[in-house]
Amino acid sequence: MVRTDLVVPAHLVSGLQMPSLSVTTAGTDVQWVDLPVGRWPFLRRSRLRLPLDPPSARLARRYLRVEPWISLTRLAALVALTTVDIVDSSAPTFWSWIVVWLVVIVSSIPRVNGVLPRQSPYRTVAGDLRIPGIPIEVAKQWVEQNPGVVPTIAPDPRPRSRRWYATWSAVLLISAIVLFTVFANNGREDSLLIWVGVLSLFLLGVAMALKMLPRGYIRIENGDS
C-alpha cells in the first residue's frame, strides 16, 4: 500500500475535516480514538481524534490506558532495586534485576501493553502537525477537504543538527567503552548497578547515533496497518 505523510499547518488544526476512512488501512470500518500529539503520549495537553481500524484502535486504547501505570511500576521497581543495591551491596539483587527486566520486556510487547499506531501525530520543528504513513487514497481526501494540507514523503528534519547528535553519540559510546574497560579489569566484584549504568550509556549512544538519520528512515512495517 502506497503511503504518504500529511503536514497540517498549525492554523488549520482546529478546523480540520477528516473523511471517515481509516488512516491505518483506508477501510470504512473505523473507530475514532484521541491520540496524543507528540512523542510523549502521557501529556494530555494536546490530542487529535483520528479514525483507526478496529484492531489498531483496540491496541491504542489499551496502550493509553495501561502504559502510564506500567511505566510507574517499572520506575518504582528500578528505584527500589537501586536503593537496596546502594544501601546493602551484599543483598541478592541479581535475580531481582533479571525479574524486573523480564517484566519490562514482556510488558513492552504490543499484544500485552498495546501500542500507538504509526500514524500518531506529532509537531514538526516549524510547529505544524505531521501525521505519518497515511494511505495515499485517504491522504487525497484529506487534501481535497482541507486546502492547505500538504502530502509529502520528504523526511521531517530533526530539532538538532547531525553534528550535535554525532558529538553526543561519540561522547556516550566512548564513555561506556572506557567505563566497561576500567570496571572489567579492576579485579573487584562491582555492583550490578554499575553495569546497568554502563549499558545505559551505550544504548543512549546508539540512540543518539540513530538520530543522525532522518525521521522514518528506519521503519518496521506491520502489514498494511
Image: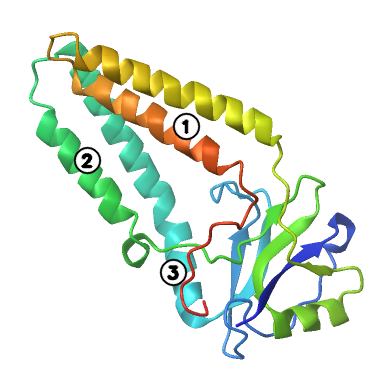
Q: Is residue 33 above or below residue 40?
A: below
Q: Residue furthest bottom?
A: 28
Image spot of residue 168 (x, y percent): 56, 26
Q: CA distance from mark 3 to mark 1?
A: 30 Å
Image position of 148 (left or right of 3) = right
Q: Is residue 37 above or below residue 206?
A: below
What crowding class fits label 3: few (fewer than 14 Cα within 10 Å), some (14-19), or many (20 or more)?
some
Badge 1 element: helix
Residue contact between numbered discs 3 and 1, judged by CB atoms under 8 Å: no
Image spot of residue 162 (x, y percent): 67, 36
On the image, numbered disc 2 is attached to which residue?
100
Image position of 162 (left or right of 118) = right
Badge 2 element: helix
The structure residue drawn at horizontal position 49% and vertical position 70%, both measured from the top left corner, is: 221
Question: Does label 3 or label 1 sit earlier along the sequence?
Answer: 3
Q: CA distance from mark 3 to mark 2?
A: 24 Å
On the image, numbered disc 1 is attached to which residue?
205
Q: Which dot marks residue 59?
A: 3
**Three-letter amino acid code of the residue under disc 3:** Leu
Badge 3 element: helix
Image spot of residue 222 (x, y percent): 46, 73
Residue contact between numbered discs 2 and 1, judged by CB atoms under 8 Å: no
**Placement of the N terminus among the 4 image quadrants:** bottom right
Q: CA distance from mark 2 to mark 1?
A: 23 Å
What crowding class fits label 2: few (fewer than 14 Cα within 10 Å), some (14-19), or many (20 or more)?
some
What crowding class fits label 1: few (fewer than 14 Cα within 10 Å), some (14-19), or many (20 or more)?
many
Image spot of residue 45 (x, y percent): 67, 48
Q: Quadrant of residue 143?
A: bottom right
**Three-letter amino acid code of the residue under disc 2:** Val
